[in-house]
Amino acid sequence: MNRPTSYAGHKNYNHWNVSLWLNNDEGLYDLCLQAINRHRFKKSALTAAAYSVMAFLPETTPDGVKYSASSIRAAMSDMRETSHYTIGNRARRAAQNACLVAKVKDPLICAGIVFFGDKE
């Protein structure tokens, strides 16, 4: 099989394939966002986040391409821009859904139920 010489702006086939999986699988994407946020204050934040994510991944993508720290870091480089926004929106949606389920209309009471648990 002849592989193209251009990989949609990625360094090579490995980086492109890993990026496809990490950016298009919701669970993997969430894992990456959490790692980025957990390591955001470190000097080498993306490298630390990449190694953190690697600990949870199998050796290869479902296509058989090996996950490497450099390919994961490259895939996560664009995620860093949106990580705070995405996680904040997901938390807000989860809180809204919890309020709907609990049929709570008062936002202050709702925040207490969502973030501190219903003590009753």
Image (cartoon, grey):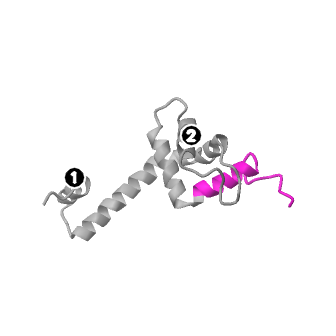
The span from disc 2 to disc 1 (Cα, nearest Å) is 32 Å
- Which residue is denoted by mark 1 in the rendering? 116
| Residue 107 image position (x, y, % from top left) | 21, 59
Query: Mark 1: which amino acid?
Result: Phe
Which residue appears at 25% of the width and 65% of the height?
99
| Residue 88 image position (x, y, % from top left) | 39, 52
- Look at the image and give the residue range highlighted in magenta: 1-23
Decide which of tag 2 and tag 1 comes sooner along the chain. Answer: 2
Q: What secondary structure is found at the residue carrying circle 2?
A: helix
42 shown above or below 100? above
Q: Is residue 100 inside the magenta stretch?
A: no
Tell me, yes or no, whether the two marked residues, 2 and 1, touch with CB atoms within 8 Å: no
| Residue 75 image position (x, y, % from top left) | 62, 48
Q: Report the mark closest to the observer, 2 or 1.
A: 2
Q: Is residue 12 inside the magenta stretch?
A: yes
40 shown above or below 115? above
Say which quarter of the image contains residue 62: bottom right
Extreme-top residue of the structure: 43
- Which residue is denoted by mark 2 in the rendering? 51
